[in-house]
């Protein structure tokens, strides 16, 4: 297994998934440097971490010089489709993601791009579920960009890492379901640590598939759970 160290950009660090991925990156010896690209301060202080506050993700031209020299992007920025019309959700999901990705690809063509998608995403773009179609088109269009590698991660129900702060209310109140759900439907449940570790391992070593379902995430995450200084946070 490669011991190559990487420099990563993380978006969405003020959300649950982004915070969880950031935590795994801070604890993992394979991650050398972390740049947070945020709209508001994450209030994270760590020797590896630097942060850029930038409001307009549809236009990164003002900060392009600060985005050079990175090996990977963990794109964890996203919104729920609940209560949204398709055009609005498309703009906040597909348009925003592709705009940022195109800029990063231009600046860092040897970069690997990891996109947080979701279980049930529709790769055909023709299904009845609006969010699944939009996510599917986002994945498909990302795959067309000339990055070193593009990977779509499709987690289902995520068990948060103990001690982290930005946990969705749903996960706080429904966390008790995790062991039951995992036992009944193992391919629908993963932990935040497994997701973060799987993303790190994928950009370091590559992966055989562009789409990583829950089973891929769990297998990769467990494989590296106790290596490279990666450990859970204790509250």
Image (cartoon, rainbow, N blue to C red):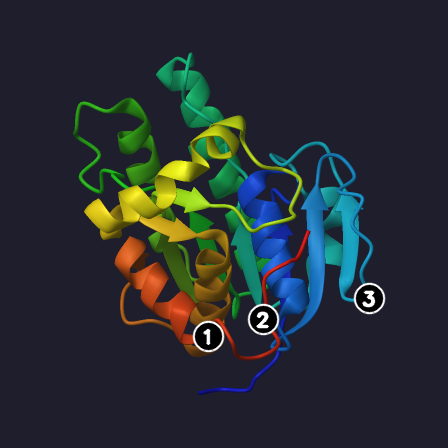
Q: Earlier in the sequence, mark 1 or mark 2?
A: 1
Rendering coords of residue 131 (x, y %): 33, 27
- The quadrant where residue 150 appears: bottom left
Name the residue at 52% across, 35% down.
96
Looking at the rendered image, the disc whose residue lies closer to the viewer, 1 or 3, is: 1
Residue 194 sits above or below residue 186 on the image: below
The spot of residue 211 in percent (x, y) is: 29, 56
Do the residues bearing badges 1 and 2 touch, measured as CB atoms within 8 Å?
A: yes
User: Is residue 152 rendered to the left or right of residue 192?
Assistant: left
Q: Residue at x 53, y 41 (%)?
A: 99
Judge whether residue 140 can be spotted in this image.
Answer: no
Q: Residue at x 47, y 25 (%)?
A: 91
Separation of marks 1 and 3 at Cα, in angstroms: 23 Å
Q: Residues within 10 Å of mark 1 (few under 14, many from 20)?
A: some
Q: Are marks 1 and 3 in contact (CB under 8 Å)?
A: no
Residue 224's label in the rendered image is: 1
Q: Secondary structure at mark 2?
A: loop
Residue pointed to by mark 2 = 230
* Helix, strand or loop for disc 1: loop
Q: Which mark is residue 63?
A: none
Q: What residue is shown with label 3?
A: 47
Q: Nearer the viewer, residue 80 or 55?
A: 80
Pinpoint residue 139: horizontal percent, then vertical percent.
34, 46
| Residue 52: x %, y % from top left | 77, 47
Spatial CA distance of label 3 from label 2 is 16 Å
């Amino acid at each position: 297994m490669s011991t190559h160290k990487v420099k990563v950009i993380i978006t969405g660090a003020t959300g649950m998934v982004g915070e969880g991925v950031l935590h795994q990156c801070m604890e993992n010896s394979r991650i050398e440097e972390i740049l947070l690209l945020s709209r508001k301060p994450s209030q994270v202080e760590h020797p590896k971490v630097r942060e850029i506050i930038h409001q307009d993700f549809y236009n990164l031209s003002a900060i392009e010089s600060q985005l050079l020299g990175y090996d990977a992007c963990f794109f964890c920025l996203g919104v729920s489709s609940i209560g949204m019309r398709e055009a609005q959700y498309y703009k906040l999901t597909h348009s925003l993601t592709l705009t940022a990705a195109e800029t990063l690809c231009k600046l860092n063509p040897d970069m690997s791009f990891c996109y947080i998608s979701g279980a049930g995403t529709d790769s055909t773009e023709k299904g009845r579920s609006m969010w699944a179609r939009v996510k599917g088109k986002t994945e498909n269009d990302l795959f067309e960009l000339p990055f070193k590698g593009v990977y779509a991660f499709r987690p289902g129900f995520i068990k948060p890492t103990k001690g982290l702060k930005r946990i969705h209310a749903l996960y706080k109140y429904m966390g008790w379901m995790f062991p039951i759900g995992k036992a009944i439907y193992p391919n629908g449940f993963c932990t935040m640590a497994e997701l973060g570790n799987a993303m790190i391992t994928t950009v370091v070593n590559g992966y055989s598939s562009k789409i990583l379902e829950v089973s891929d995430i769990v297998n990769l995450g467990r494989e590296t759970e106790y290596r490279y200084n990666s450990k859970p946070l204790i509250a």
